[in-house]
Amino acid sequence: SGAQGGFCWVSSFSCVQNSELFTLTYGALVTQLCKDYENDDDVNKQLDKMGYNIGVRLIEDFLARSNVGRCHDFRETADVIAKIAFKMYLGITPSITNWSPGGDEFSLILENNPLVDFVELPDNHSTLIYSNLLCGVLRGALEMVQMAVDVKFVQDTLKGDSVTEIRMKFIRRIEDNLPAGEE
Amino acid sequence: MAIFSVYVVNKAGGLIYQLDHYAPRADTEKTFSFPLDLVLRPHDERVVVAFGQRDGIRVGHAVLAINGAEVNGRFTADGKDVLEFLSNPANYPVSIRFGRHRLSSNEKLMLASMFHSLFAIGSQLSPEVGSSGIEMLETDTFKLHCFQTLTGIKFMVLADPRQTGIDALLRKIYEIYSDFALKNPFYSLEMPIRCELFDQNLKLALEVAEKAGPFGPGS
């Protein structure tokens, strides 16, 4: 799906004929990592790392296609992530809630998560953060636009919670190697 | 060809991609007898014409080849100093090829890095806060258009001053970069782009932009 001057309202995800292949691919990835690493913690770290490598690339695709400008505060960032980015790549629009008083932390509430369709966590993987790839993606993408953030799952439907909640915290602006005009 | 070159510069100012899209102007090759009626002098790493223009040989043209063999800077292919060689009557008649010196890849790297530093001056000079860097550089023979992404990568296009639609072309090149470079898992970020699909799609985009022409609608 191409963007013609504006951003594409039809998410690239829903344009995929069969999103089952995507879910299966992600599942195969996680189970292979579980076999390769012996504990959930290492798998979680790997997923975050892989997500990071995706995020640093995906941000350019996002900027090239959506044409959004630079966000000047964290609330703008939250809006862009929930309403444009998530819609574009996963076909869902999480809601934004639980703002911290300082405006530097918020939660994304996902009613459904395409990555976990048909997934059930077994008892021996109770500390596995199945969708941790997403945290890495968000962290990597924002780092490329000079924002250091901390991203983690605080609720997960796979673990019995009613919703999936991702908590995002702004840490600092990355000052080294600022593009010209951003000082 | 109205779009001359494309440069892509990474966040640190390193040139990661360069394409020349123009037909080089013809070189001139002539046979000379002693004494040479052109005045030659060394300039940087080359030997250039200082005085004496004729038959397509212009002041500023560099010596590109002697007797069919390309010169290596100020030395002939077999290691002799060019100026010494040409001052010896025993070496005549000699065939010399003159032409405009084409930038070497090292020179392009240096120029891109220099532009990267210069780019920031645009925002520093501005009386307004948050100004962009240099977006256009104009000479009488070309216009250089520059687009810097929010992530700090710069795409530069050198084109005929009358060519329109370059803004759209720059954004198209950003899309092509995000597709054929970034989505190639074997391409490492910030490194030189050596992806065939990137080359092919870029050339296609340049041709489309050129066809739109200076008087056509912006592509």
Image: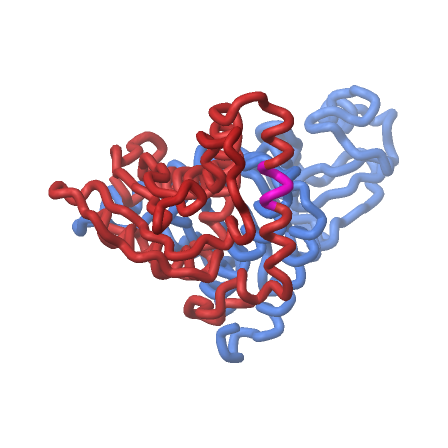
Chain colours: A red, B blue
Q: Pick whichever, B56 or A159, lies toward us.
A: A159
Quadrant holding the C terminus of chain A = top left
The furthest residue to the front: A123
Residue B100 appears in view = yes
Q: Nearer the viewer, residue A49 or B3?
A: A49
B47 left or right of A58? right
Query: Is residue B9 shown in magenta?
Result: no
Residue at horizontal 69%, vertical 26%?
B74
Q: Which residues are magenta?
A: A26-30
In percent of width and height, residue A75 lies at 22, 52
Q: Main secondary structure of the magenta part?
A: helix
Q: How many marks?
A: 0
Q: Is residue A1 above or below residue B195?
A: below
Percent position (x, y) of residue B110? 52, 33
Q: Who's the residue at 29% across and 51% down the image?
A: A77
**Residue B111 shows up from this direction:** no
Identity of the residue drawn at 49% across and 74% down: B218
**Percent x, y for residue B72?**
74, 28
